[in-house]
Image (tube, helix red, strand yellow):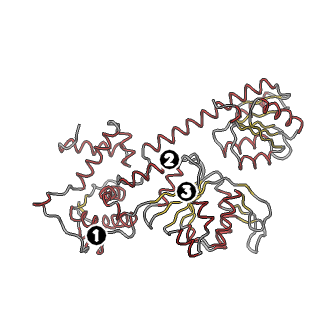
């Protein structure tokens, strides 16, 4: 249980004297107390700040305590809410508890009883948060991400993803086109404390500046000719979640200024409006450009760059991790094989061709090549002539001499060794191994059974 002075309580009551008295008592007990004199004010505070407990009056003028409770649990699902009411009937208490309240406390409040309830409720909140944190850590360690690769740099990247996902800082993801920047962003989101909220990717290259302003910030009714009614923007709709600005280097300079203000103030103003609306989003950005060079050219703001680049995750191009090509090929073969079809393999010559190719389009290009090759292949094995001309006609390719170097391992042999090594690393736990490999447990069981039949399984 944390110390009282680290526990933040939101206290809501439209009766100012009650609000002041209870706030003073809780502060004397060492709690951090923020007060709100209305339900609307309380919901705004919940959107802006982190709280461990909400204590709210039931009957208030604008928004009642039940609505405050629902909003609190939408933003912070693990939070507990104590509802206080002067209408202390059995029905009101039962209704409040049924809708998710930790406790329904009648007025006048007995301060000793309130203190005991606060301790119990916050202990429950902290326990839930710790369980969520441990679940996320286990999920990260089990390698739920489908970012395929065992190259040294990729393993380091996976460790960084798992670590920084737990922090709420901005992250800049860099890498060439097709390296998997959105996949990295989505994995950060899935492993983060915000995974129960929205993930919203926004392609900056696909929108004009006027469209981007309207989409991001929304507009008030009659803000312009076709604005028939109020419309919430994407930033507002993703409140509590994670936003990815893909191709951030394509964002116009004037839009960069607006985004910088959002990052600094954590507030937006709808088009045609004057009211500041608080938002709480985690921002990820991705680019295939060298933003430092764009700063020198005057096409990207330096202050925005430093705001975004709190952490930089760089994805190496496929040509720098060719040892991952067999794993990726195997993954895409499994992904694009039709259900019920006999699994296809790839010939040694075709795999060599792929390993010799530079892949300007990176893993995305390899995925497209494998999907196309499977569509063209009527045999059980993908051969060189099934590959695109730019790959199959590579002049760099030369099949190694079997008499000098010895035979290269087939894709099936590489797959077997990879699966058995993963199985060994998790002490034979097939469920964990299947998750790490990216297949279901039944598929893993079939592969292991096949290895036993061929006399190739170990241990």
Q: Position of residue 452 (x, y in %)?
A: 21, 41
Q: Position of residue 372 (x, y in %)?
A: 34, 67
Badge 2 vs badge 1, beta-carbon distance below 8 Å: no
Q: Position of residue 353 (x, y in %)?
A: 25, 67
34 displayed left or right of 313: right
User: For the view shown, which residue lies furthest in the top direction?
Assistant: 112
Query: Considering the image in quadrants, where does the N terminus appear?
Result: top right
Residue beneath disc 3: 171
Disc 1 packing (10 Å; few <14; some 14–19; many ≥20): many
Eye-nearest disc, 1 or 3: 3
Which residue is at 86% across, 36% downward? 20
Taking depth in this image into account, of 54 and 158 the one nearest to the observer is 158
Mark 1: secondary structure:
loop
C-alpha span from label 2 to label 1: 39 Å
Eye-nearest disc, 2 or 1: 2
In the rendered structure, which disc, 2 or 1, sits on the residue that comes first in sequence?
Answer: 2
C-alpha span from label 2 to label 3: 12 Å
Q: Position of residue 186 (x, y in %)?
A: 51, 55
C-alpha span from label 1 to label 3: 37 Å
Badge 1 vs badge 3, beta-carbon distance below 8 Å: no
Residue 387's tag is 1
Residue beneath disc 2: 163
In the rendered structure, which disc, 2 or 3, sits on the residue that comes first in sequence?
Answer: 2
């Amino acid at each position: 249980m944390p110390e009282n002075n680290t526990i933040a309580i939101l206290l809501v009551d439209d009766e100012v004297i009650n609000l002041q008295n209870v706030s003073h008592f809780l502060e004397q007990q060492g709690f951090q107390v923020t007060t709100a004199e209305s339900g609307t004010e309380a919901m705004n505070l919940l959107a802006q700040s982190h709280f461990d407990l909400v204590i709210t009056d039931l009957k208030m003028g604008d928004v009642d305590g039940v609505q405050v409770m629902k909003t609190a649990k939408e933003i912070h699902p693990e939070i507990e809410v104590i509802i206080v009411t002067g209408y202390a009937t059995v029905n009101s208490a039962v209704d409040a508890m049924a809708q998710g309240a930790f406790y329904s406390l009648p007025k006048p409040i007995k301060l000793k009883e309130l203190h005991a309830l606060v301790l119990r409720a916050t202990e429950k909140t902290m326990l839930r948060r710790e369980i969520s944190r441990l679940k996320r850590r286990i999920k990260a360690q089990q390698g739920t991400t489908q970012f395929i690769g065992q190259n040294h740099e990729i393993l380091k990247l996976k460790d960084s993803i798992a670590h920084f996902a737990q922090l709420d800082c901005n992250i800049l993801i860099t890498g060439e086109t097709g390296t998997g920047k959105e996949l990295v962003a989505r994995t950060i989101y899935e492993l983060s404390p915000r995974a129960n909220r929205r993930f919203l990717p926004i392609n900056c290259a696909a929108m004009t500046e006027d469209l981007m302003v309207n989409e991001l910030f929304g507009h008030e009714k009659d803000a312009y000719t076709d604005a028939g009614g109020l419309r919430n923007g994407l930033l507002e709709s993703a409140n509590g979640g994670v936003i990815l600005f893909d191709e951030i280097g394509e964002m116009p300079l004037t839009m960069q200024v607006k985004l910088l203000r959002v990052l600094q103030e954590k507030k937006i103003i709808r088009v045609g409006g004057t009211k500041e609306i608080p938002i709480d989003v985690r921002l990820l950005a991705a680019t295939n450009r060298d933003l430092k060079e764009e700063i020198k050219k005057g096409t990207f703001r330096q202050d925005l760059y430093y705001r975004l680049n709190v952490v930089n995750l760089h994805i190496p191009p496929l040509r720098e991790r060719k040892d991952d090509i067999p794993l990726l090929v195997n993954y895409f073969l499994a992904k694009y094989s039709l259900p019920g079809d006999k699994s296809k393999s790839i010939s040694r010559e075709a795999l060599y061709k792929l390993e010799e190719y530079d892949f300007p389009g990176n893993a995305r290009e390899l995925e497209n090549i494998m999907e196309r090759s499977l569509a063209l292949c009527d045999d059980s094995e993908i051969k060189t002539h099934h590959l695109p001309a730019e790959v199959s006609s590579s002049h760099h390719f030369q099949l190694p001499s079997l008499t000098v170097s010895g035979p290269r391992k087939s894709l099936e042999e590489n797959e077997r060794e990879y699966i058995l090594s993963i199985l060994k690393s998790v002490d034979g736990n097939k469920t964990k191994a299947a998750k790490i490999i990216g297949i279901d447990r039944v598929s893993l069981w079939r592969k292991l059974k096949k290895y036993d039949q061929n006399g190739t399984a170990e241990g």
